Image: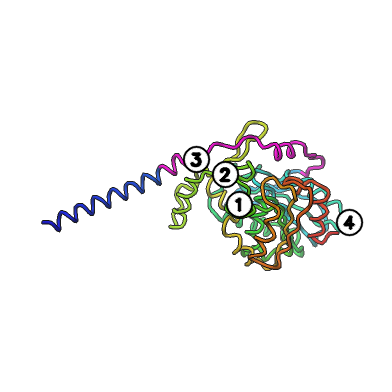
Amino acid sequence: MCWGFEMRKFWLLLTVVLGVVVAAFAGALTFGTSTPPARLGAINDAISSRNLAGLPPAETFAARDGEKLTFRKYMGAPNRAVVLVHGSTGRSESVHELAKYLSALPQAPTLYTLDIRGHGLSGQLGDISYIGQLEDDLADFLKARAAVQPSATWSLVGHSSGGGFALRIAGSPVGSKFEKVVLLAPMLDPRGATYRPNGGGWAAPYIPRIIALRLLESARVSLFQNLTAIAFAPRDDGTVPTYTYRLLRNFGVDEAWPGYLKAAPRAPVVLVGGKDELFVPEAFGPMMKSARADVDVTILPGLTHMDMVYHPDALQAIARALGLR
């Protein structure tokens, strides 16, 4: 009789504990959001002042799911090609001035700027269908362009979150396609030494929701990954860009960056501005070299985060990293 009472007490306690866990998960998923950041002039002012003269028309390619994804092409040598990837909440136009500069060089390659799925004109804004879809998209893009440039050697350049994604690509199977990889002020681990609190005011991650979804992901449960997981500083039109959890996880490397860096066939070149507002420039060298000693990290004095795709000093450094100067 005593034994039966103890068992009932055990099952009651277990039920209560499971109820608390489920309630905590439900609360984190439902209410674990954050207030969006304030307008960030350092980024918005730079974006609003850009010159888009000579922007090529938008073209599309078909991804494996049938979605038409957008890119822009800058004509150059057919035997060399470079893919440029924008940063968080950006689009192909964000790297237009860099592409325009590189396309004017004497040995200019063919250049492609992409609207990464979930951005610009590619797919549903702020979302993708599954973690890993962005790698699939890039592989599909390269396959489509192989019919046009079958003998081209490829390089990859990514800025900010696009730099984190470029590192992810470098350490993934599709990374073998790229002869050179250049990371411009790359977004790495938000808990790492290179990251300023809340990305210098650029982003407000939904920490409780992210923790709950990471736990589900570690258990191989992909439910609720369509929930919003981060809000970015508002645009000048008042809209607040957001990413779902699956886009946030895919468009970057997070704490897994050392593994991707080690797995890359060739060490990438890293360029960061000495006055970057979102990241800590001096931390990139020690942090990244702790994972791979041959990674080349250069700080460009006086340059800001957005200068890395606009400023003449940055454009020249990128050209040198690509072997075009």
Mark 1: amino acid: Phe
Q: Looking at the image, which is closer to me, 142 or 32?
A: 32
Q: Looking at the image, which is closer to me, 267 or 3?
A: 3
- Pinpoint residue 212: horizontal percent, then vertical percent: 45, 49
Highlighted range, magenta? 27-56
The quadrant of the image that shows the N terminus is bottom left
Label 2, label 1: how many angstroms apart (C-alpha)? 10 Å
Quickly name the residue at label 2: 243
Quickly name the residue at label 1: 251
Label 2, label 3: how many angstroms apart (C-alpha)? 12 Å
- Dot 4 alpha-carbon crowd within 10 angstroms: few under 14, some 14 to 19, many 20 or more: few
Marked residue nearer the N-terminal end (2 or 3): 3
Q: For residue 106, which numbered disc appears in the image?
A: 4
**Residue, x 67% and y 44% (percent of image)?**
90
- Pinpoint residue 247: horizontal percent, then vertical percent: 57, 49
Q: Kindly indicate whether the residue at mark 1 contacts the one at mark 2 (C-beta within 8 angstroms).
A: yes
Label 4, label 1: how many angstroms apart (C-alpha)? 33 Å
**Outermost top residue:** 238
In what element is the residue under mark 2?
strand
Q: Nearer the observer, disc 4 or disc 1?
A: 1
Q: Nearer the observer, disc 2 or disc 3?
A: 3
Label 3, label 1: how many angstroms apart (C-alpha)? 20 Å
- Dot 2 alpha-carbon crowd within 10 angstroms: few under 14, some 14 to 19, many 20 or more: many
Quickly name the residue at label 3: 33
Residue 276, above or below 256: above
Q: Kindly indicate whether the residue at mark 3 contacts the one at mark 2 (C-beta within 8 angstroms).
A: no
- Pinpoint residue 9: horizontal percent, then vertical percent: 20, 52
Instruction: Tell me the quarter of the picture where residue 136 sits.
Output: bottom right
**Residue, x 32% and y 47% (percent of image)?**
19
In what element is the residue under mark 1?
loop
